[in-house]
Protein backbone atom coordinates (compact mmCIF):
# COMPACT_ATOMS: atom_id res chain seq x y z
CA UNK A 1 0.00 0.00 0.00
CA UNK A 2 1.46 3.33 -1.05
CA UNK A 3 1.32 6.32 1.29
CA UNK A 4 1.08 9.54 -0.70
CA UNK A 5 2.25 12.78 0.87
CA UNK A 6 -0.26 15.61 0.52
CA UNK A 7 1.34 19.07 0.80
CA UNK A 8 -0.57 21.55 2.97
CA UNK A 9 -1.31 25.02 1.68
CA UNK A 10 0.23 27.94 3.48
CA UNK A 11 -2.90 29.14 5.28
CA UNK A 12 -1.56 32.65 5.84
CA UNK A 13 -1.10 33.31 2.15
CA UNK A 14 -4.04 31.21 0.94
CA UNK A 15 -6.63 32.77 3.24
CA UNK A 16 -8.10 36.07 2.11
CA UNK A 17 -11.56 36.93 3.43
CA UNK A 18 -11.09 40.41 1.97
CA UNK A 19 -11.03 38.98 -1.54
CA UNK A 20 -13.77 40.62 -3.65
CA UNK A 21 -16.81 38.39 -3.72
CA UNK A 22 -16.89 36.30 -6.91
CA UNK A 23 -19.89 35.69 -9.17
CA UNK A 24 -20.56 32.33 -7.59
CA UNK A 25 -20.75 33.63 -4.04
CA UNK A 26 -22.79 36.59 -5.26
CA UNK A 27 -25.32 34.15 -6.73
CA UNK A 28 -25.34 32.14 -3.49
CA UNK A 29 -26.03 35.31 -1.49
CA UNK A 30 -28.88 36.23 -3.82
CA UNK A 31 -30.42 32.76 -3.60
CA UNK A 32 -30.23 32.81 0.18
CA UNK A 33 -31.68 36.31 0.21
CA UNK A 34 -34.69 35.01 -1.71
CA UNK A 35 -35.03 32.25 0.89
CA UNK A 36 -34.63 34.74 3.73
CA UNK A 37 -37.60 36.75 2.50
CA UNK A 38 -39.80 33.71 3.22
CA UNK A 39 -38.63 33.41 6.82
CA UNK A 40 -40.66 34.71 9.75
CA UNK A 41 -39.47 38.21 10.64
CA UNK A 42 -37.80 37.12 13.86
CA UNK A 43 -35.46 34.81 11.93
CA UNK A 44 -34.35 37.37 9.35
CA UNK A 45 -30.97 39.10 9.35
CA UNK A 46 -30.62 42.83 9.10
CA UNK A 47 -27.86 42.55 6.50
CA UNK A 48 -28.18 44.64 3.34
CA UNK A 49 -26.91 42.26 0.68
CA UNK A 50 -26.12 44.96 -1.89
CA UNK A 51 -23.44 46.17 0.52
CA UNK A 52 -21.68 42.79 0.59
CA UNK A 53 -18.36 43.30 -1.18
CA UNK A 54 -15.93 40.75 0.24
CA UNK A 55 -15.80 37.00 0.64
CA UNK A 56 -15.76 37.37 4.41
CA UNK A 57 -18.91 39.50 4.38
CA UNK A 58 -20.62 37.02 2.08
CA UNK A 59 -19.59 34.14 4.35
CA UNK A 60 -21.08 35.87 7.40
CA UNK A 61 -24.38 36.46 5.62
CA UNK A 62 -24.47 32.88 4.31
CA UNK A 63 -23.89 31.55 7.83
CA UNK A 64 -26.61 33.66 9.39
CA UNK A 65 -29.27 32.78 6.83
CA UNK A 66 -28.39 29.08 6.77
CA UNK A 67 -28.64 28.90 10.55
CA UNK A 68 -31.87 30.90 10.46
CA UNK A 69 -33.45 28.49 7.98
CA UNK A 70 -32.61 25.54 10.22
CA UNK A 71 -33.86 27.38 13.30
CA UNK A 72 -37.12 28.32 11.61
CA UNK A 73 -37.73 24.69 10.65
CA UNK A 74 -36.86 23.50 14.15
CA UNK A 75 -39.23 26.05 15.66
CA UNK A 76 -41.99 24.91 13.31
CA UNK A 77 -41.33 21.28 14.17
CA UNK A 78 -41.58 22.02 17.88
CA UNK A 79 -44.84 23.88 17.28
CA UNK A 80 -46.11 21.00 15.18
CA UNK A 81 -45.08 18.58 17.92
CA UNK A 82 -47.06 20.54 20.47
CA UNK A 83 -50.10 20.35 18.21
CA UNK A 84 -49.73 16.59 17.95
CA UNK A 85 -49.24 16.25 21.70
CA UNK A 86 -52.37 18.28 22.34
CA UNK A 87 -54.33 16.25 19.82
CA UNK A 88 -53.11 13.05 21.48
CA UNK A 89 -54.16 14.35 24.88
CA UNK A 90 -57.63 14.88 23.48
CA UNK A 91 -57.77 11.33 22.23
CA UNK A 92 -57.25 12.20 18.57
CA UNK A 93 -53.80 10.59 18.62
CA UNK A 94 -53.18 8.86 15.34
CA UNK A 95 -56.84 8.66 14.32
CA UNK A 96 -56.54 11.12 11.51
CA UNK A 97 -54.62 13.95 9.94
CA UNK A 98 -53.53 16.97 11.89
CA UNK A 99 -56.44 19.43 11.91
CA UNK A 100 -56.28 22.54 9.78
CA UNK A 101 -54.51 25.57 11.20
CA UNK A 102 -57.70 27.27 12.38
CA UNK A 103 -59.14 24.20 14.06
CA UNK A 104 -55.81 23.31 15.66
CA UNK A 105 -55.61 26.77 17.14
CA UNK A 106 -59.05 26.56 18.71
CA UNK A 107 -58.39 23.06 20.09
CA UNK A 108 -55.11 24.29 21.45
CA UNK A 109 -56.77 27.15 23.23
CA UNK A 110 -59.36 24.81 24.70
CA UNK A 111 -56.72 22.37 25.85
CA UNK A 112 -54.70 25.10 27.51
CA UNK A 113 -57.72 26.26 29.43
CA UNK A 114 -58.24 22.86 31.00
CA UNK B 1 -23.37 -11.15 -10.70
CA UNK B 2 -20.15 -9.11 -10.40
CA UNK B 3 -19.17 -8.97 -6.70
CA UNK B 4 -18.37 -5.26 -6.97
CA UNK B 5 -21.97 -4.50 -7.87
CA UNK B 6 -23.31 -7.09 -5.43
CA UNK B 7 -21.46 -5.35 -2.62
CA UNK B 8 -22.27 -1.79 -3.65
CA UNK B 9 -24.60 -0.05 -1.17
CA UNK B 10 -23.44 3.57 -1.14
CA UNK B 11 -22.58 6.04 -3.86
CA UNK B 12 -20.82 9.28 -2.93
CA UNK B 13 -20.34 12.21 -5.32
CA UNK B 14 -17.86 15.00 -4.56
CA UNK B 15 -18.26 17.93 -6.94
CA UNK B 16 -15.43 20.44 -7.08
CA UNK B 17 -15.35 23.78 -8.89
CA UNK B 18 -14.25 25.26 -12.18
CA UNK B 19 -11.25 23.45 -13.60
CA UNK B 20 -10.89 21.73 -16.97
CA UNK B 21 -9.58 18.25 -17.67
CA UNK B 22 -6.43 19.42 -19.47
CA UNK B 23 -5.69 21.93 -16.68
CA UNK B 24 -5.81 19.29 -13.92
CA UNK B 25 -5.11 15.92 -15.55
CA UNK B 26 -3.67 16.85 -18.96
CA UNK B 27 -0.14 16.05 -17.78
CA UNK B 28 -1.06 12.37 -17.37
CA UNK B 29 -0.86 11.69 -21.11
CA UNK B 30 2.88 11.56 -20.60
CA UNK B 31 2.38 8.84 -17.97
CA UNK B 32 -0.36 6.88 -19.73
CA UNK B 33 -0.98 7.70 -23.42
CA UNK B 34 -4.52 6.32 -23.15
CA UNK B 35 -5.42 9.41 -21.10
CA UNK B 36 -6.49 12.13 -23.53
CA UNK B 37 -4.61 15.13 -22.18
CA UNK B 38 -2.09 17.66 -23.34
CA UNK B 39 0.18 17.09 -26.37
CA UNK B 40 2.65 19.23 -28.32
CA UNK B 41 0.20 19.68 -31.17
CA UNK B 42 -2.25 21.81 -29.19
CA UNK B 43 -2.43 25.60 -29.23
CA UNK B 44 -4.70 28.65 -29.16
CA UNK B 45 -4.10 31.96 -30.93
CA UNK B 46 -3.70 35.04 -28.79
CA UNK B 47 -5.00 38.41 -29.93
CA UNK B 48 -1.79 39.16 -31.83
CA UNK B 49 -2.22 35.95 -33.84
CA UNK B 50 0.66 34.17 -32.12
CA UNK B 51 0.02 30.55 -31.19
CA UNK B 52 0.09 29.79 -27.45
CA UNK B 53 0.80 26.22 -26.43
CA UNK B 54 -0.36 24.63 -23.18
CA UNK B 55 2.49 24.80 -20.68
CA UNK B 56 2.98 23.09 -17.28
CA UNK B 57 3.20 26.41 -15.48
CA UNK B 58 -0.04 26.49 -13.50
CA UNK B 59 0.22 27.83 -9.96
CA UNK B 60 -1.82 26.95 -6.91
CA UNK B 61 -3.19 30.46 -6.46
CA UNK B 62 -2.82 33.99 -7.75
CA UNK B 63 -2.55 33.14 -11.44
CA UNK B 64 -6.18 33.02 -12.63
CA UNK B 65 -7.13 36.39 -11.23
CA UNK B 66 -9.53 37.75 -12.32
CA UNK B 67 -11.71 34.67 -12.36
CA UNK B 68 -11.85 33.57 -16.03
CA UNK B 69 -15.22 34.30 -17.58
CA UNK B 70 -17.32 31.16 -17.97
CA UNK B 71 -20.75 32.55 -18.58
CA UNK B 72 -22.55 31.43 -21.69
CA UNK B 73 -21.27 34.04 -24.21
CA UNK B 74 -17.66 33.63 -23.04
CA UNK B 75 -17.80 29.84 -23.29
CA UNK B 76 -19.32 30.19 -26.75
CA UNK B 77 -16.26 32.22 -27.73
CA UNK B 78 -13.92 29.68 -26.12
CA UNK B 79 -15.51 26.76 -27.98
CA UNK B 80 -16.07 28.37 -31.38
CA UNK B 81 -13.13 30.78 -31.47
CA UNK B 82 -15.33 33.77 -32.15
CA UNK B 83 -17.07 32.36 -35.23
CA UNK B 84 -20.76 33.27 -35.04
CA UNK B 85 -21.78 32.10 -38.52
CA UNK B 86 -24.61 29.57 -38.90
CA UNK B 87 -22.19 27.00 -40.33
CA UNK B 88 -19.57 27.39 -37.63
CA UNK B 89 -17.68 24.39 -36.27
CA UNK B 90 -16.44 24.05 -32.70
CA UNK B 91 -12.63 24.26 -32.59
CA UNK B 92 -11.65 25.17 -28.96
CA UNK B 93 -9.62 28.11 -30.27
CA UNK B 94 -11.07 30.99 -28.27
CA UNK B 95 -9.76 30.51 -24.73
CA UNK B 96 -6.91 33.01 -24.90
CA UNK B 97 -9.08 35.54 -26.74
CA UNK B 98 -11.78 35.17 -24.11
CA UNK B 99 -9.38 35.71 -21.21
CA UNK B 100 -7.82 38.69 -23.00
CA UNK B 101 -11.24 40.35 -22.99
CA UNK B 102 -11.09 40.66 -19.21
CA UNK B 103 -7.82 42.58 -18.80
CA UNK B 104 -6.68 43.48 -22.33
CA UNK B 105 -3.31 42.00 -21.37
CA UNK B 106 -1.79 39.61 -23.93
CA UNK B 107 0.72 38.10 -21.51
CA UNK B 108 -1.85 37.49 -18.81
CA UNK B 109 -4.35 36.00 -21.26
CA UNK B 110 -1.88 33.22 -22.12
CA UNK B 111 -2.08 31.84 -18.58
CA UNK B 112 -5.43 30.32 -19.43
CA UNK B 113 -3.42 27.63 -21.29
CA UNK B 114 -1.35 26.61 -18.26
CA UNK B 115 -1.76 23.19 -16.68
CA UNK B 116 -0.53 21.40 -13.55
CA UNK B 117 2.18 18.79 -13.48
CA UNK B 118 1.48 15.35 -12.06
CA UNK B 119 3.69 16.14 -9.05
CA UNK B 120 1.76 19.31 -8.21
CA UNK B 121 -1.49 17.39 -7.77
CA UNK B 122 -0.53 14.18 -5.97
CA UNK B 123 -4.09 13.45 -4.84
CA UNK B 124 -6.05 13.93 -8.05
CA UNK B 125 -3.43 12.36 -10.30
CA UNK B 126 -2.91 9.39 -7.98
CA UNK B 127 -6.65 8.71 -7.89
CA UNK B 128 -6.84 9.04 -11.68
CA UNK B 129 -4.02 6.57 -12.22
CA UNK B 130 -5.14 4.15 -9.50
CA UNK B 131 -8.85 3.93 -10.33
CA UNK B 132 -11.05 4.90 -13.31
CA UNK B 133 -10.50 8.20 -15.10
CA UNK B 134 -13.04 9.35 -17.69
CA UNK B 135 -11.70 10.67 -20.98
CA UNK B 136 -15.07 12.15 -21.94
CA UNK B 137 -16.92 13.64 -19.00
CA UNK B 138 -18.28 17.04 -19.93
CA UNK B 139 -20.05 19.83 -18.11
CA UNK B 140 -23.75 19.65 -18.95
CA UNK B 141 -23.98 23.18 -20.32
CA UNK B 142 -21.40 25.51 -21.90
CA UNK B 143 -22.05 27.92 -19.06
CA UNK B 144 -21.51 28.67 -15.37
CA UNK B 145 -21.77 26.79 -12.10
CA UNK B 146 -25.38 26.95 -10.97
CA UNK B 147 -27.04 25.59 -14.10
CA UNK B 148 -24.38 22.88 -14.40
CA UNK B 149 -24.78 21.72 -10.83
CA UNK B 150 -28.53 21.61 -11.40
CA UNK B 151 -27.97 18.76 -13.84
CA UNK B 152 -26.32 16.76 -11.06
CA UNK B 153 -29.37 17.14 -8.85
CA UNK B 154 -32.29 17.24 -11.30
CA UNK B 155 -30.97 15.97 -14.64
CA UNK B 156 -31.78 19.36 -16.16
CA UNK B 157 -31.47 23.06 -15.45
CA UNK B 158 -35.08 23.68 -16.49
CA UNK B 159 -34.01 25.84 -19.41
CA UNK B 160 -31.60 28.09 -17.54
CA UNK B 161 -28.05 28.81 -18.70
CA UNK B 162 -27.23 31.32 -15.99
CA UNK B 163 -26.87 31.62 -12.22
CA UNK B 164 -30.51 32.36 -11.44
CA UNK B 165 -32.30 29.16 -10.62
CA UNK B 166 -35.29 28.56 -8.45
CA UNK B 167 -36.76 25.14 -8.83
CA UNK B 168 -40.13 25.36 -7.17
CA UNK B 169 -42.96 23.64 -9.02
CA UNK B 170 -40.69 22.27 -11.71
CA UNK B 171 -41.70 19.07 -13.51
CA UNK B 172 -38.71 16.88 -12.57
CA UNK B 173 -37.97 15.89 -9.00
CA UNK B 174 -34.52 16.05 -7.48
CA UNK B 175 -32.63 12.79 -7.07
CA UNK B 176 -33.03 13.24 -3.29
CA UNK B 177 -36.81 13.50 -3.51
CA UNK B 178 -36.92 10.42 -5.69
CA UNK B 179 -34.90 8.37 -3.23
CA UNK B 180 -36.51 9.38 0.04
CA UNK B 181 -40.02 9.01 -1.35
CA UNK B 182 -39.39 5.64 -2.99
CA UNK B 183 -40.97 2.42 -1.80
CA UNK B 184 -38.99 0.83 -0.31
CA UNK B 185 -37.54 4.07 1.02
CA UNK B 186 -33.94 4.99 0.26
CA UNK B 187 -31.72 7.48 2.00
CA UNK B 188 -29.91 10.50 0.61
CA UNK B 189 -27.97 13.39 2.06
CA UNK B 190 -26.26 16.55 0.85
CA UNK B 191 -23.28 17.31 2.98
CA UNK B 192 -22.19 20.93 2.82
CA UNK B 193 -18.90 21.87 4.41
CA UNK B 194 -20.37 23.96 7.25
CA UNK B 195 -23.10 26.54 7.72
CA UNK B 196 -20.77 29.35 6.68
CA UNK B 197 -20.09 27.69 3.36
CA UNK B 198 -23.64 26.32 3.13
CA UNK B 199 -25.00 24.91 -0.09
CA UNK B 200 -24.53 26.40 -3.49
CA UNK B 201 -27.25 25.80 -6.00
CA UNK B 202 -30.14 24.16 -4.26
CA UNK B 203 -31.34 26.78 -1.87
CA UNK B 204 -34.88 25.63 -2.52
CA UNK B 205 -34.03 22.25 -1.01
CA UNK B 206 -32.36 23.89 1.97
CA UNK B 207 -35.36 26.15 2.35
CA UNK B 208 -37.98 23.43 2.14
CA UNK B 209 -36.22 20.21 3.13
CA UNK B 210 -33.34 21.12 5.46
CA UNK B 211 -33.45 17.57 6.84
CA UNK B 212 -31.75 16.47 3.61
CA UNK B 213 -28.60 18.35 4.60
CA UNK B 214 -25.67 17.50 6.80
CA UNK B 215 -22.27 19.05 7.40
CA UNK B 216 -18.90 17.65 6.44
CA UNK B 217 -18.08 16.66 10.05
CA UNK B 218 -21.32 14.66 9.98
CA UNK B 219 -20.15 12.95 6.81
CA UNK B 220 -16.94 11.95 8.58
CA UNK B 221 -18.95 10.57 11.49
CA UNK B 222 -21.36 8.77 9.16
CA UNK B 223 -18.39 7.11 7.46
CA UNK B 224 -16.76 5.97 10.68
CA UNK B 225 -20.02 4.73 12.21
CA UNK B 226 -21.26 3.02 9.04
CA UNK B 227 -24.25 5.32 8.71
CA UNK B 228 -23.70 6.62 5.20
CA UNK B 229 -26.93 7.10 3.28
CA UNK B 230 -27.44 5.26 0.02
CA UNK B 231 -26.53 8.42 -1.87
CA UNK B 232 -24.33 11.26 -0.63
CA UNK B 233 -23.45 14.48 -2.42
CA UNK B 234 -20.57 16.45 -0.91
CA UNK B 235 -19.86 20.13 -1.40
CA UNK B 236 -16.44 21.60 -0.60
CA UNK B 237 -15.88 24.82 1.33
CA UNK B 238 -16.87 27.66 -1.00
CA UNK B 239 -15.32 30.56 0.91
CA UNK B 240 -12.52 31.61 3.24
CA UNK B 241 -13.86 32.05 6.74
CA UNK B 242 -13.14 31.67 10.43
CA UNK B 243 -14.67 28.90 12.45
CA UNK B 244 -14.49 27.54 15.99
CA UNK B 245 -11.68 25.29 14.83
CA UNK B 246 -9.68 28.08 13.23
CA UNK B 247 -9.24 29.52 9.76
CA UNK B 248 -11.06 27.60 7.04
CA UNK B 249 -9.48 28.03 3.62
CA UNK B 250 -11.85 27.56 0.69
CA UNK B 251 -11.36 24.06 -0.70
CA UNK B 252 -13.53 24.21 -3.84
CA UNK B 253 -10.58 25.06 -6.16
CA UNK B 254 -12.63 27.80 -7.80
CA UNK B 255 -10.17 30.38 -9.19
CA UNK B 256 -8.58 32.09 -7.32
CA UNK B 257 -8.98 29.73 -4.36
CA UNK B 258 -6.05 27.58 -3.36
CA UNK B 259 -5.64 24.35 -5.30
CA UNK B 260 -3.74 22.56 -2.52
CA UNK B 261 -6.61 23.14 -0.08
CA UNK B 262 -8.82 21.33 -2.57
CA UNK B 263 -6.33 18.49 -2.89
CA UNK B 264 -6.35 18.12 0.86
CA UNK B 265 -10.15 18.04 0.90
CA UNK B 266 -10.39 15.40 -1.84
CA UNK B 267 -7.85 13.31 0.06
CA UNK B 268 -9.82 13.64 3.29
CA UNK B 269 -13.06 12.48 1.62
CA UNK B 270 -11.27 9.49 0.10
CA UNK B 271 -9.53 8.67 3.36
CA UNK B 272 -12.78 8.84 5.37
CA UNK B 273 -14.43 6.34 3.03
CA UNK B 274 -11.40 4.10 2.79
CA UNK B 275 -11.05 3.96 6.58
CA UNK B 276 -14.75 3.21 6.97
CA UNK B 277 -16.14 -0.31 7.38
CA UNK B 278 -18.23 0.66 4.33
CA UNK B 279 -15.22 0.87 1.98
CA UNK B 280 -16.09 -2.43 0.24
CA UNK B 281 -19.65 -1.18 -0.25
CA UNK B 282 -18.98 2.35 -1.48
CA UNK B 283 -18.10 4.04 -4.76
CA UNK B 284 -16.84 7.63 -4.84
CA UNK B 285 -17.08 9.89 -7.89
CA UNK B 286 -14.86 13.00 -7.87
CA UNK B 287 -15.97 15.40 -10.59
CA UNK B 288 -15.77 19.13 -11.40
CA UNK B 289 -18.89 21.15 -12.17
CA UNK B 290 -17.50 23.03 -15.17
CA UNK B 291 -14.22 24.15 -16.71
CA UNK B 292 -14.23 27.68 -15.29
CA UNK B 293 -13.05 29.26 -18.55
CA UNK B 294 -9.78 27.29 -18.45
CA UNK B 295 -8.44 25.61 -21.61
CA UNK B 296 -9.37 22.12 -22.73
CA UNK B 297 -8.77 20.71 -26.20
CA UNK B 298 -11.68 18.28 -26.65
CA UNK B 299 -14.66 19.60 -28.63
CA UNK B 300 -17.86 19.15 -26.60
CA UNK B 301 -20.17 16.84 -28.54
CA UNK B 302 -23.77 17.33 -29.52
CA UNK B 303 -26.30 15.66 -27.23
CA UNK B 304 -29.98 14.89 -26.94
CA UNK B 305 -31.84 18.22 -26.74
CA UNK B 306 -33.59 18.94 -23.48
CA UNK B 307 -37.25 19.79 -23.65
CA UNK B 308 -36.31 23.36 -22.70
CA UNK B 309 -34.86 26.17 -24.78
CA UNK B 310 -32.96 29.18 -23.48
CA UNK B 311 -33.89 32.34 -25.37
CA UNK B 312 -31.42 34.44 -27.33
CA UNK B 313 -31.79 37.05 -24.65
CA UNK B 314 -30.92 34.54 -21.91
CA UNK B 315 -27.88 33.13 -23.69
CA UNK B 316 -26.47 36.57 -24.48
CA UNK B 317 -25.17 35.34 -27.83
CA UNK B 318 -28.06 36.44 -30.00
CA UNK B 319 -28.97 32.80 -30.56
CA UNK B 320 -31.27 30.52 -28.56
CA UNK B 321 -29.88 27.33 -27.06
CA UNK B 322 -31.74 24.00 -27.09
CA UNK B 323 -29.39 22.25 -24.67
CA UNK B 324 -28.20 20.14 -27.56
CA UNK B 325 -24.46 20.53 -26.93
CA UNK B 326 -22.47 19.67 -23.83
CA UNK B 327 -20.14 22.03 -22.00
CA UNK B 328 -16.36 21.83 -21.82
CA UNK B 329 -14.68 18.64 -20.55
CA UNK B 330 -13.93 18.32 -16.83
CA UNK B 331 -11.97 15.88 -14.65
CA UNK B 332 -13.97 12.89 -13.41
CA UNK B 333 -12.67 9.88 -11.47
CA UNK B 334 -14.59 6.89 -10.13
CA UNK B 335 -13.08 5.24 -7.07
CA UNK B 336 -13.82 1.82 -5.60
CA UNK B 337 -11.71 -1.12 -4.44
CA UNK B 338 -13.48 -3.16 -7.12
CA UNK B 339 -12.10 -1.07 -10.00
CA UNK B 340 -8.93 -2.33 -11.71
CA UNK B 341 -5.91 -0.07 -11.30
CA UNK B 342 -5.30 2.16 -14.31
CA UNK B 343 -8.79 2.04 -15.79
CA UNK B 344 -9.32 4.64 -18.54
CA UNK B 345 -12.93 5.05 -19.62
CA UNK B 346 -12.84 5.92 -23.30
CA UNK B 347 -15.34 5.92 -26.15
CA UNK B 348 -18.27 6.77 -23.89
CA UNK B 349 -19.68 10.24 -23.18
CA UNK B 350 -20.85 11.40 -19.76
CA UNK B 351 -22.11 14.63 -18.30
CA UNK B 352 -23.63 15.62 -14.95
CA UNK B 353 -27.02 14.24 -15.99
CA UNK B 354 -25.23 10.89 -15.71
CA UNK B 355 -25.25 11.37 -11.93
CA UNK B 356 -29.03 11.25 -11.29
CA UNK B 357 -29.30 8.77 -14.17
CA UNK B 358 -26.86 6.40 -12.46
CA UNK B 359 -28.26 6.84 -8.95
CA UNK B 360 -31.83 6.39 -10.17
CA UNK B 361 -31.11 3.29 -12.24
CA UNK B 362 -28.96 1.68 -9.58
CA UNK B 363 -31.26 2.24 -6.59
CA UNK B 364 -34.71 2.62 -8.13
CA UNK B 365 -34.64 1.00 -11.55
CA UNK B 366 -37.21 2.62 -13.80
CA UNK B 367 -38.40 6.06 -12.79
CA UNK B 368 -40.55 8.60 -14.53
CA UNK B 369 -40.71 11.46 -15.32
CA UNK B 370 -37.11 12.39 -15.96
CA UNK B 371 -35.67 14.97 -18.35
CA UNK B 372 -34.77 13.91 -21.91
CA UNK B 373 -31.14 14.75 -21.12
CA UNK B 374 -31.14 12.44 -18.12
CA UNK B 375 -32.95 9.55 -19.77
CA UNK B 376 -30.39 9.59 -22.59
CA UNK B 377 -27.34 10.03 -20.32
CA UNK B 378 -24.87 7.18 -19.92
CA UNK B 379 -24.46 5.65 -16.46
CA UNK B 380 -21.09 5.23 -14.74
CA UNK B 381 -22.25 2.34 -12.56
CA UNK B 382 -24.26 -0.42 -14.14
CA UNK B 383 -27.54 -1.45 -12.51
CA UNK B 384 -27.03 -4.72 -10.66
CA UNK B 385 -29.50 -6.56 -12.83
CA UNK B 386 -28.64 -9.52 -15.04
CA UNK B 387 -27.22 -9.51 -17.57
CA UNK B 388 -24.48 -7.03 -16.62
CA UNK B 389 -22.39 -6.07 -19.65
CA UNK B 390 -18.76 -6.76 -18.62
CA UNK B 391 -17.46 -4.22 -21.14
CA UNK B 392 -19.39 -1.45 -19.38
CA UNK B 393 -19.07 -2.50 -15.74
CA UNK B 394 -16.23 -0.56 -14.12
CA UNK B 395 -16.47 -2.37 -10.76
CA UNK B 396 -15.29 -5.49 -12.50
CA UNK B 397 -12.74 -7.16 -10.23
CA UNK B 398 -13.48 -10.64 -8.92
CA UNK B 399 -11.77 -9.80 -5.63
CA UNK B 400 -11.43 -6.54 -3.77
CA UNK B 401 -8.11 -4.74 -4.09
CA UNK B 402 -5.88 -4.40 -1.06
CA UNK B 403 -3.32 -2.16 -2.73
CA UNK B 404 -5.32 1.07 -2.86
CA UNK B 405 -3.24 4.13 -1.99
CA UNK B 406 -3.39 6.10 1.25
CA UNK B 407 -2.87 9.81 1.79
CA UNK B 408 -1.19 11.34 4.84
CA UNK B 409 -4.05 13.63 5.83
Image (cartoon, coloured by chain):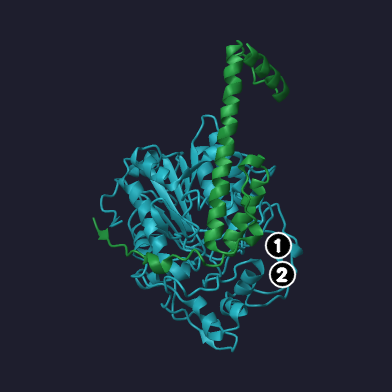
Say which colour chain A has: green
Judging by the rendered image, the residue that carries numbered circle 1 is: B321
Q: Quadrant of the N terminus of chain B?
A: top left
Q: Which chain has been coloured cyan in this picture?
A: B
**Could you say where residue B392 lies in the image, as x and y percent from the top left?**
45, 51
What is the secondary structure assignment of the residue under circle 1? loop
Q: Residue at point 46% right, 63% down?
A: B253
Q: Residue at point 54% right, 67% down?
A: B292
What is the secondary structure assignment of the residue under circle 2? loop
Residue placed most toward the observer, B229 or B330: B229
Q: Is residue B397 visible?
A: no
Q: Chain of mark 2?
A: B
Is B329 situated left or right of B306 in this image? Answer: left
Judging by the rendered image, the residue that carries numbered circle 2 is: B317
Q: Are marks 2 and 1 in contact (CB under 8 Å)?
A: yes
Residue placed most toward the observer, B303 or B252: B252
Amino acid sequence: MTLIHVPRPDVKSAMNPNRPVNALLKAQVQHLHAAERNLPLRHRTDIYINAIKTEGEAAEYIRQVTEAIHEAHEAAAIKRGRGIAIAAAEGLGDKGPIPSRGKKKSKGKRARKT
Amino acid sequence: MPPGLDNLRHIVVLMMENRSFDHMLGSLTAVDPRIDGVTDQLSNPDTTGALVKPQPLAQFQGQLDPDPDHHFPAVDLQIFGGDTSPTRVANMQGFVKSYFNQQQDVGHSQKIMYYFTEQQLPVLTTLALEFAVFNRWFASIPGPTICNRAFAHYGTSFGRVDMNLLYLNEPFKSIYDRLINAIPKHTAKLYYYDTTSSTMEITNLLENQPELFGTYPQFLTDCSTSHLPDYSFIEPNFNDHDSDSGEEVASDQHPDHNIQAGELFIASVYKAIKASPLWPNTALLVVYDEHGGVYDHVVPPACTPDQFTASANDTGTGQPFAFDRLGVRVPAILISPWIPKGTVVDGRVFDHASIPATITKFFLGDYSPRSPRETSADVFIEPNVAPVDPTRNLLSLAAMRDDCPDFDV
